[in-house]
Structures are given as structure tokens and as C-alpha cells.
Amino acid sequence: MWSRTRVLRVGRYIAEHQLLRRDGRYLVALSGGADSVALLLLLQDLGYHIEAAHCNFHLRGEESDRDERFVVSLCQERGVELHRAHFDTREYATLHHVSIEMAARDLRYHYFEQLRQDLGFDGICVAHHRDDNVETVLMNLIRGTGLRGLQGIRPKNGYILRPLLCLSRQDIEHYLSECHQAYVTDSTNCMDDVVRNKIRLNVVPRLLDINPSAAANIDRTAAYVADAIGVYDEAIDRQRRDAVVEESDDRLVVDLKKLSSESLLFELLRPYGFPADTSASIWAMRPAADHTGKLFSSADYDLVVDRDKLVVERRRQPLKALRVPECGTYVFGSEQRFTVECQEKTEGFQPSREALLVHLDAATVRFPLTLRQVQEGDWFVPFGMTGRKLVSDFLTDRKVNLLDKKKALVVCDATNAIVWLVGYRTDNRFRVSDETESVLKMNVNVNLNT
């Protein structure tokens, strides 16, 4: 009786969240553990067309092979077609510089998705249940993932479907017991060596001691948060339009004066990999002007506070110095061009006033030239001045932020003298004068803000 009740509960949950279609074809991620075995049986009982997929990660020696043998036997007994894959997970982790847990996750989901595409299946069913959701909410709360993280695991994420989120681990074990169905146990789940296991083995039991309904209450609260996310997103989008000056995958510029809340700042920075403590730090120092130049970094992006602006940019590899032995057009960076031409100075000639096109006295510039990024200690004599000035100080005076300073380019001649701070100023020692006979024309098509 109880087993049938759970079948019906899962059926209602699938219908409520529109997870599976009656005419659909679905893969079941089958490890051999209690959760995935229950998922296989429940979906079969509900009459869905399913096939199973199993991954052997070769991380637990004979135990991994035992799991595979069990899965093979189970699928034969239940008449379910099985797809199997073997992985050298440790080698993958080493090669990609990720943890064993992340390597196994990447391999598993990549295999499932490739299999889904190859076989034309409509979705991949995984066996996350209510207790997994509770653990996820607690993990996100500890990590500080913001309001969105408190909604926990969602029933559907692309082609990943989770029909068992309505059941607890205890429900699953009772169901299998009533069905007289065996399963295997992963011994690593009993070791509190990773965060999720620490929460499962140490934190959740203490919460249940305090309140036996703690897990159910956390799960219910996550559902409330998920319902509220839509309203939250609408409010964030309205505020975003006021505060964001520029936004793309590579660059974000925010007007700090128009930031209405720390939550908005967190949501703006989240896609760029910045954690909650970064947005908290910036929000705390927001009214102060003396934090200009403060730098923060995520895995792939740099962020700088620039007076009343916040600028985020994707981190790029430093530009390799370009040697220019003679006049011509040279390609550097991402198909950018540096062109050098020599021409006679004609009557009435006027030097360029454009930022990326300059004219110099050809007789004073010695080849080969070098186009490179600014280095510490670089100095030049800015056009119109007689004394030398550090490039970094010149850029600071021009209120150039730290990220743009790091990208600044200079052209040096054979004596290593800077003849042009690209986009800003030429060196006065190489200026075109009344005595100039030949002019060296240089232009760059670089975008200084990318």
C-alpha cells in the first residue's frame, strides 16, 4: 500500500512540474544506489519508456565493478536496456586541474548528454531527492550564494529532470523495502571528507534533533523562495536598467551612484564569478571616494572601483611584444593592425589630432620599433612638455582606471625610447617641427576599452 502511495506521489509531482511526457523517451542515470534504483522502478511502474545509463569511474576498486555488475543484473531482470561507460577519472581530474568530485560530475553529465543526443531521448532523469535538496540549500547558505541559491535543486534544468524531489531518503528506502528490491551502497558516502557529506552526516542530524521537521521545513522554504524568484528577478531587472552603463560577456560597467541595493550588486557580479563577499565589500565601501583603484579578481575576470564607476573585464593573456623592423602593416592581438608609413612633409602639413593616428619626425625615430604593453618604470616626455614623466603617473592624471592602465600600449624605437603612448600622447622629442623633412605616420586600430 505504502509503495503504491509513493508511486502516485511521484506521478503527481511529474504532472505538476510537467517533467515527462507519456510519449517521451528518457534516460535514467543508474548508479545502483538506493535513489537511482528507486527512480528506475518508479518510472517503470508509472509506464514511462526508459533506458538506463551507468558510469564506472574506477575510483573505488572492486566496489566500482560490483556496482556495475549489480546494475547489469538489475536491468536484465527489469527488461531495461543499459548503456555503460568507463572513465579514468583521476587522469581527467589531473589533466583539467579539477577535484575528483568535479571530474566525475563533468564526465557523467557530458556522457549522459551525448547519449541523449545520439539516441534522440527527451530527457535525463536523475535521482536527487528531498534530502539532497536540503543539503544543497544548507551548502549554498554556508557559501553565500544569495537568494537564488536558497531555492535549492530545481525539478528541471534543461534536459536534466528530477522526479524524486518529492520523496525523502527514508521514503525511498521504505519503498525499496516494500518492493523487496536490493541496492548497493557507496562506502564513500559514509565518510565526512567533503562538504556535502559533512552536512549529511553531521549537520542535518543535529538539526533533526532540534526539530524533527527541520528537513521538511527547509525543503518547503526552498519552494517558497523558488516561487518568489520571479518577483525578485523583475525587481532586479528594473534596478539593473538604471545602474548598468554597459554589459556584455566580456565587460560590465556599473554606475555606483545608482546602485539601489547590495542584492542588485550581487546579481550583477554573479555571472562573472564573484562571490557574495566581493559584493559585500564593495557595497560597504561604496560611499567612500578613496577606494578608487581597489582591485578584485574572480577566476576569469578582474574588477576595479573607478571613482563612481565599477568596471569588470574578462582577463586576457598579456600582449606579446610586436617587433616592427620597417614600414608596413603588422597584425597583432586579435587581428588588430599596426601600420607604419614614411612620407614627405608637404607644404601646409598638419599633424594628426586623432587618438589612434599620429605623425612623428622620421629622422628622429630609429628602427626597429616595438609595440608592447606598458611596463613598470616606463617614462616619456609627453608632447608639449619638456620634462619626463612616468607613464603610470600620466595615466593616473588622465583618470585612467587600473584595468585600462594594464592594457595600455607604447611604441618604442631602437633606443628603447617611448615615441608614442598609444591613444594618449606622443613623445615631445619626436614631434614634427618646422625642420622636419620626412614624416613617420603610425596608426593602430585597437579598441582601448577591450
Image (spheres, rainbow, N blue to C red):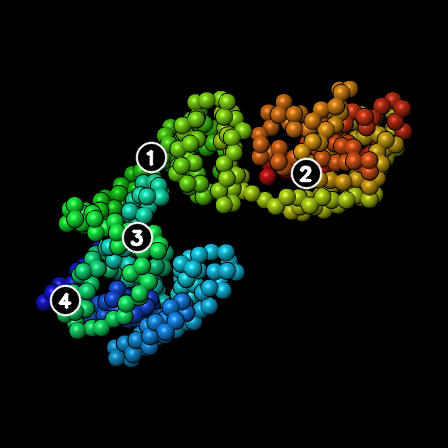
Closer to viewer: mark 3 or mark 1: 3
Horizontal relation, residue 404 to residue 217: left or right: right
| Label located before the other in sequence (3 or 4) | 4
> Tag 4 or tag 2, which sits nearer the N-term?
4
Looking at marks 4 and 1 on the same chain, the residue that comes earlier in the sequence is marked by: 4
Distance CA(mark 1)–CA(mark 2): 42 Å
Whichever of callouts 1 and 2 sits on the residue coming sooner in the sequence is 1
* Residue 170 % position (x, y): 18, 60
Q: State the separation of the CA atoms marked 3 and 1.
A: 36 Å
The secondary element bearing badge 2 is classed as strand
Q: Nearer the viewer, mark 3 or mark 4?
A: 3
Q: Is residue 24 visible?
A: no
Residue marked by disc 4: 3
Give the residue drawn at x 35%, y 44%.
143
Residue type indicated by callout 2: Gln
Q: Secondary structure at mark 1?
A: helix
Give me the C-alpha separation between circle 3 and circle 4: 30 Å
Q: Does label 3 or label 1 sit earlier along the sequence?
A: 3
Residue named by callout 2: 373
- The CA span between labels 2 and 4 is 69 Å
- Residue type at mark 4: give it: Ser
Give the CA distance from mark 4 to mark 1.
44 Å
Q: Residue 236: x and y, percent?
A: 36, 35
The residue sitting at 15% across, 46% down in the picture is 211
22 or 281: which is nearer to us? 281
Query: Which disc number belongs to residue 235?
Result: 1
Residue 198 bears which disc, if any? 3
